[in-house]
Image (tube, helix red, strand yellow):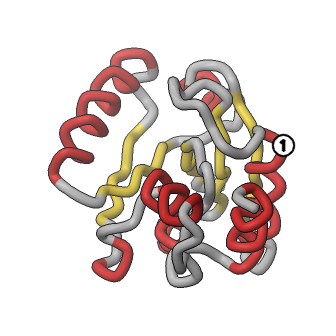
Amino acid sequence: MKRVVVYPGTFDPVTLGHLDVIERSLKLFDKVIVAVTTKSGKKPLFSLEERVALLKQCTARFNRIEVKPFSCLLVDFAKKEKAGAIVRGLRELSDFEVEFQQAIVNRKLAPLLETVFVATSPKYFHLNSTMVKEIASMHGKIDCFVPKVVLSSLKKKFK
């Protein structure tokens, strides 16, 4: 049986930290579904279609990855995709508090669905999409935070 995991997020935009979690998840699972949410409570800079397209470009070098949008409950999406787990990257203690609460709720909604926490690699510990967008909006240097295709897309957004 294939071990399938869902890695959900807004990915607005996808960063090298996100790609690190994806690559490391491939070591643990047979298939990784990168699930791009339409409902996050955030106002994204990139449209859903743009975020999916950027992720597909950024993950094209990996096999065993699918990028899909979703707008339902994460547990329902995971069930539909026959995933046995959700993977979440953790950068700091405050991430754990929020992610742990969500994992408990997901466990109540789908008792057979596990949550796997992956600690962020130290070189990406400081990185988040909000910071990347803020620096990009002020035309700062972000090539050490995002893949080239994302860098190009951010430059176009902030001309």
According to the image, label 1 marks what residue? 49
In this figure, what is the number of numbered marks? Answer: 1
Q: Residue at x 43, y 30 (%)?
A: 112
Residue 39 at least partly seen: yes
Q: Residue at x 52, y 42 (%)?
A: 84
Quarter where residue 101 is shown: top left
Viewer-proximal residue, 56 or 130? 130
Q: Above or below — where is 61 with respect to 95?
A: below
- Where is residue 100? Give x, y as percent: 24, 37
Residue furthest to the left in view is 93
- Where is residue 52? Give x, y as percent: 78, 50
Identify which amino acid the numbered label 1 is placed on. Glu
Q: Above or below — where is 22 with respect to 66?
A: below
Residue 59 at least partly seen: no
Q: Residue at x 55, y 43 (%)?
A: 9
Side of 127 relative to 62 (left or right): left
Q: Quadrant of the C terminus?
A: bottom right
Residue furthest to the top in view is 109
Q: Above or below — where is 118 with respect to 9?
A: below
Side of 106 relative to 10 (left or right): left
Viewer-proximal residue, 150 or 68? 150
Quarter where residue 40 is shown: top right
Quarter where residue 76 is shown: top right
Q: Residue at x 60, y 24 (%)?
A: 39
- Where is residue 105? Give x, y as percent: 33, 21
| Circle 1 SS class | helix
- Where is residue 118? Give x, y as percent: 35, 61
Side of 29 relative to 72 (left or right): left
